[in-house]
Image (cartoon, rainbow, N blue to C red):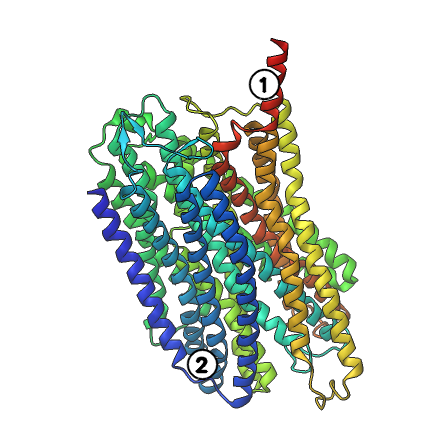
Amino acid sequence: MELNLLTIIVMFAVALALAYAAINFYLVKRLKEGNARMQEIAAAIREGANAFLLYEYRIVAIIAAAVAVLLALFIAWEAGVAFLLGALMSSAAGYVGMKIATYSNVRVTHTADETRDVGRTLQVAFRGGSVMGLCVAGFALLGALIVYLCFGWAGGMLALEGGEVVAHVNPITRQSYNLSIVLSGYALGCSVIAMFNRVGGGIYTKAADMGADLVGKTEAHIPEDDPRNPAVIADNVGDNVGDVAGLGADLLESYVGAIMATVILAIEIFTHTAGFTSESLLQKLMLFPILFAGIGLIGCVVGIAYPLVRKRLKSAHLELNLATWIAAAVALAGGCVLSILLFQGEESAQLAAAKQSLGAVTPWVTGAVGIVAGIVIGVLSEYYTSDAHKPTRGIAEASRGGPSLTVTKGMATGMISCLLPVLCLCVAIFVCYAVGGMYGVGCGAVGMLSFVAATVSVDTYGPISDNAGGIAEMSGLDPAVRDITDALDSVGNTTAAIGKGFAIGSAALATMSMMSSYLYAAAEGTMSALTLNIVRGDVLVGALLGAALPFLFSGLLINAVTSSAQKMVGEVRRQFQEIDGILEGRGKPDHKRCITIASQGALRGMIAPAIISVAVPVVCGFLFGAGFVGGLLIGATLTAIMLAVYAGNAGGAWDNAKKYVEKGGLEGQGKGSPAHDAAVVGDTVGDPLKDTVGPSLNILIKIMSTVSLVCVVVFQNFNLLSAIDGAAELFGG
């Protein structure tokens, strides 16, 4: 029955989502692109995005192949294959999303120019964004389904013998492994691609954005996206490689991480819990997360279709929110039915042993808690970043006093904004744990991301609208066209802040679940998890080192953005000085040179942070053992969550404070005023925080926990500290 449920629900959801994505891709592609100038600009953006992403993927392919070989040799060949599958699914989603974004942007501009109708323009932008959202969830579940079918049932890894999960043995290390390691390999493949896409794309887009703003706006006092600015094409390319491909890979990785962490936790709890002996309950606990995700994906198709089939749309903000809420409502209702049907008939004693304290509805209740927590965190993010509220308006007001006060006020706002989202996370974790144990915490993460296709669709719509505005400006269209695209873009900024709240919350819950699985896996077959005593030397030192890692990671990213932006600023200044008549519109700027600078800076800057995220837990494990790595994960997770909230909210608030000044929110101030110059400086300070550091920190902690889980089967027995202790005992004896 369970296999039929899995294949029917999940395969139907995947087929429905990918088919609808293909239809929307076709419907967008058939629209007109506009005049020759618009087509020329769009082609330049498309060419730059394609070139960067393909070159990045060539580098990543080499690294992924090397990691897959190491996994296959020293962990499990199945884990190596699953890793490549995860990398392939994540890459495919990012590539398709980037392609549709570069096709959609100019068509959104043309629709706004042709119709002067906000509703019809919104539909084109959202249809383009929906392709990315549906591909993220569709490809993620397709890969998970393949892993289940090939290595679970067909590979015999879901079989049980003598009340224990069947384990295989690596012929080189002689260490045993089960399906947990294979699922971790799939999640790790998604995470590695997400790291490169998010970090590389984030460095690219923010270097170009900062270079364009610092010289164009504050020095030359020309409008944003002015065609005279040499960095403007690179800036628009960056929106696609960072805010579309990077965003999609990021949330696909979060989605997969949450599902896999919960399934893995079910296996580890069964293996290490004395009273939990029901094989049917184990299989149902393993099936619930992926089935819940499948139902959520079906809900997303319904929610996404709602604003696309309506003839007249009233408010962009309302319509996008309705798309998300409809998807969430279907996920909630369907999840409740699933939980009751799947777990009914299971013995209450077995449910209690698995810590499912509310019986059959326990997984659904914890998933619902995750959904509510995600919404609350998103609302809090909106409060601290929207110019409709006091915090952001306070930053705008501070800009009257110059850049220093703008930056200082934004830093304070970002720091203050950490408390309430973290408090919400604490409540969600406490409730989920009280109701369903650590498995319940994992279900909370799955619930939070169960309608990820809708949230990614809404998030991707923002960069598409932003690009459309840039094309309108560079093409010299009527200002009314830019007004329409700016109105859509401003809504996108708010929805993006909400999406980042979901990403941070789900990352925290998924990381905790993966960390719990790590503690069980490190217990070496005992009927309990590894205990981390914080006053024990190795755990304490590991926690301190882990707490420092997110700061090192963030500093490297900011340095990479700064270095690349510095070169961009120098290049833009050089062209303004050396190209005759460029500011008068007679000279033609060299856009390709700026694209090259952004690409090279991104490709150089993404290597070190990605290596740190993978190598540090592995090296520490082989040197100091499982306890040290456990402390490392705790320290890194705690500081990364705080830094991610701070970076996202501070950067978003600086950005919207600038927009508030630009639209006349400060009396007597506006574009080109000293207050506006100060607000632009604040925005550029926040750029690498909100779009590079914050999102990448989520991936950092998930990669660290996943790679630790994959490798613990080896370094729990083979590490330098244990070898030294063993030698000391031998000589002492």
Residue 210 image-quadrant placement? bottom right
Count every numbered label the image shows and give the total: 2
For the C terminus, the image quarter is top right
**Which three-letter amino acid code belongs to the residue tagged 1?**
Gly
- Is the Cβ of the residue at disc 2 closer than 8 Å to that at disc 1? no
| Relative image position of residue 32 (x, y in whole percent) | 43, 85
Which residue in the structure is indicated by mark 2?
117
Residue nearer the viewer, 470 or 204: 204
Q: Residue furthest front?
A: 172
| Relative image position of residue 359 (x, y in whole percent) | 28, 32
| Relative image position of residue 591 (x, y in whole percent) | 66, 78
Q: Residue 308 has which mark?
A: none
**Which three-letter amino acid code belongs to the residue tagged 2?**
Asp
Image vertical order of residue 659 relative to residue 76, above or below: below
| Relative image position of residue 666 (x, y in whole percent) | 69, 68
Q: Is residue 610 something one can see in this rendering?
A: yes
Q: Residue furthest top?
A: 733
Q: Is residue 533 left or right of residue 427?
A: right
Instruction: Tell me the residue at 23%/28% (across/down).
Output: 347
For marks 2 and 1, give the CA distance: 75 Å
- Dot 1: element: helix
Residue 37 image-quadrant placement? bottom right
Residue nearer the viewer, 606 or 572: 606
Q: Residues within 10 Å of mark 1 (few under 14, many from 20)?
A: few
Residue nearer the viewer, 239 or 201: 201
Which residue in the structure is indicated by mark 1?
726
Q: Which of the two discs, 2 and 1, labels the residue nearer the N terminus?
A: 2
For the N terminus, the image quarter is top left
Q: Residues within 10 Å of mark 2 (few under 14, many from 20)?
A: some
Q: Is residue 654 left or right of residue 263?
A: right
